[in-house]
Image (cartoon, rainbow, N blue to C red):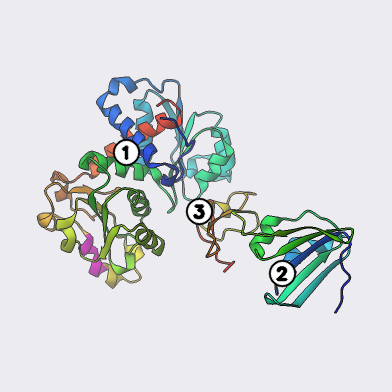
């Protein structure tokens, strides 16, 4: 299957197969007026299978959120058909309003419109703890 | 000493040097009380207690009064606008207009951190649910320092509910930073320390062990920190009935203890220490409550930038 290359825009490459749709939704790509292509299960020499998202416009990206969902993603910025820069993501030190604390004893369960903040406490094990109650977030693993 | 912290939310906000400084000031308060009598004149402490407390609230208030300052506040959520649904942020932002420093207890974990983000007034965490209670840990450290002369080179026994007891977890974390502390964890299998504490003990390289019987290790201990074994922590009544007496300290169990043992308890006590032990010179739990006032005086002075 062939999808046209991006002339000026962003290519999110090396997305873990299956996570493309999650990123599509988190970035609200359905709200964009430019062309957006999401490829699933593309053959990859590195990972076997991967997802790719191509966005035909240079938009602001939430690196914190992207890094949390998949820190192996490569972000390629393309301008006039040429690769402008390539960025590799990392697990962010802090997550703000990306995941929610599920501890019913946490202040975030009752305080209005409070930011949900998580801190990375173990990079190797990808462990995040709520900045308020210190309870570990389990969903990621 | 320069103050590096603006609030006290967790005991780990403090370096060993900062703890040492607070202990020095607490001792100076006892040695030179006249110097401190009016040191906080014109300053106000607000005690915002969204859940009940005896020792912590009264010791904060006594501490501020002894420094010549004034106190205001409430002693239960029902007597504040929290009962009308007001948020912690709004309550604290309002109280920040009236007070110079705030001590706060709240049933929700992390509430003092939320408070600290909404006001420039220093916030002291006076207990947030089962999470942190740093001024209790400071109290415990001051008591051990005064009784033993140092915070290292001791065998510390912790007995009772080591699973849910937040004072125990904080004390272990704080004492792990000192040299040559041996930890003896005395608890039934159901109430042993959580895995993350065990992990910290392993990582630290400290000497530690877990036992079920108090009598077995009594002779080794320099400090015995008692906590309450609560009925509701057990899955069934038989287990509770079988174990509850094992963790009640009485004069008979003290027979093999060292003559200079320091017996501590964060209080309130229910029945885990026999009242007959109260007259034993080794019983230090009411002295510990006094230490709580002294260290809170030192903390108030520090956070207000006075000492």
The structure residue drawn at horizontal position 9% and vertical position 56%, both measured from the top left corner, is B255
**Label 3 SS:** loop
Query: Does the rendering let one see residue B155?
Result: yes
Q: Which mark is residue B292?
A: 1
Residue interval drawn in magenta: B241-247
Residue at 19% from the left image edge and 50% from the top image edge:
B222
Label 1 Cα neighbours within 10 Å, binned few <14 / some 14-19 / many ≥20: many
Camera-side residue of B279 and B158: B158
Q: Is residue B225 magenta?
A: no
Tell me which secondary structure the magenta stretch mostly adopts. helix
* Tags 2 and 1 touching, CB below 8 Å: no
Residue A14, which numbered label? Answer: 2
Q: Quadrant of the C terminus of chain A?
A: bottom right
Compared to A5, does B36 lie above or below?
above
Figure label count:
3
Real-space Cα separation, disc 2 to disc 3, in angstroms: 34 Å
What is the crowding at mark 3: few (fewer than 14 residues within 10 Å), some, or many (at least 20)? many
Q: What is the number of the mark on residue A133?
A: 3
Q: Nearer the viewer, mark 2 or mark 3?
A: 2
Identify which residue is drawn at 88% across, 65% down.
A35
């Amino acid at each position: 299957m062939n999808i046209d290359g991006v002339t000026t825009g962003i290519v999110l490459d090396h997305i873990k197969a299956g996570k493309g749709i999650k990123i599509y939704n988190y970035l609200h790509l359905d709200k964009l007026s430019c062309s957006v292509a999401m490829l699933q299960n593309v053959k990859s020499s590195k990972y076997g299978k991967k997802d790719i998202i191509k966005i035909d416009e240079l938009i602001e990206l939430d690196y914190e959120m992207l890094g949390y969902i998949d820190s192996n993603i490569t972000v390629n910025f393309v301008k006039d058909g040429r690769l402008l820069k390539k960025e590799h993501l990392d697990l962010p030190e802090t997550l703000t309003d990306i995941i929610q604390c599920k501890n019913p004893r946490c202040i975030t369960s009752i305080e209005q419109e409070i930011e949900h903040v998580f801190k990375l406490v173990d990079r190797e094990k990808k462990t995040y703890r709520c900045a308020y109650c210190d309870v570990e977030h389990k969903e990621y693993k | 000493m320069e103050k590096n912290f603006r609030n006290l939310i967790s005991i780990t906000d403090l370096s060993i040097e900062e703890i040492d400084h607070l202990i020095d000031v607490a001792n100076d308060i006892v040695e030179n009380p006249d110097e401190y009598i009016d040191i906080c004149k014109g300053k106000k402490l607000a005690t915002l207690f969204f859940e009940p407390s005896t020792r912590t609230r009264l010791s904060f208030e006594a501490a501020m009064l002894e420094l010549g300052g004034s106190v205001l506040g409430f002693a239960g959520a029902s007597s504040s606008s929290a009962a009308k649904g007001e948020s912690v942020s709004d309550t604290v932002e309002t109280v920040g207009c009236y007070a110079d420093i705030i001590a706060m207890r709240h049933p929700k974990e992390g509430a003092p951190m939320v408070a600290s983000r909404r006001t420039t007034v220093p916030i002291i965490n006076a207990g947030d649910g089962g999470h942190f209670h740093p001024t209790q840990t400071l109290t415990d450290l001051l008591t051990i320092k005064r009784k033993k002369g140092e915070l290292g080179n001791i065998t510390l026994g912790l007995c009772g509910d080591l699973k849910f007891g937040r004072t125990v977890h904080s004390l272990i974390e704080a004492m792990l930073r000192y040299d040559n502390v041996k930890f003896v964890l005395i608890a039934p299998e159901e109430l042993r320390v959580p895995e993350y504490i065990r992990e910290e003990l392993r990582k630290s390289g400290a000497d530690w062990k877990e036992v079920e019987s108090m009598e077995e290790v009594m002779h080794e201990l320099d400090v015995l920190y008692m906590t309450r074994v609560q009925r509701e922590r057990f899955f069934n009544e038989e287990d509770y009935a079988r174990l509850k007496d094992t963790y009640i300290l009485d004069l008979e169990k003290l027979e093999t203890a060292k003559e200079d043992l320091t017996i501590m308890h964060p209080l309130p006590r229910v029945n885990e220490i026999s009242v007959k032990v109260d007259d034993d010179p080794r019983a230090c739990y009411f002295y510990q409550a006094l230490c709580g006032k002294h260290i809170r005086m030192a903390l108030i002075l520090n956070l207000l930038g006075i000492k």
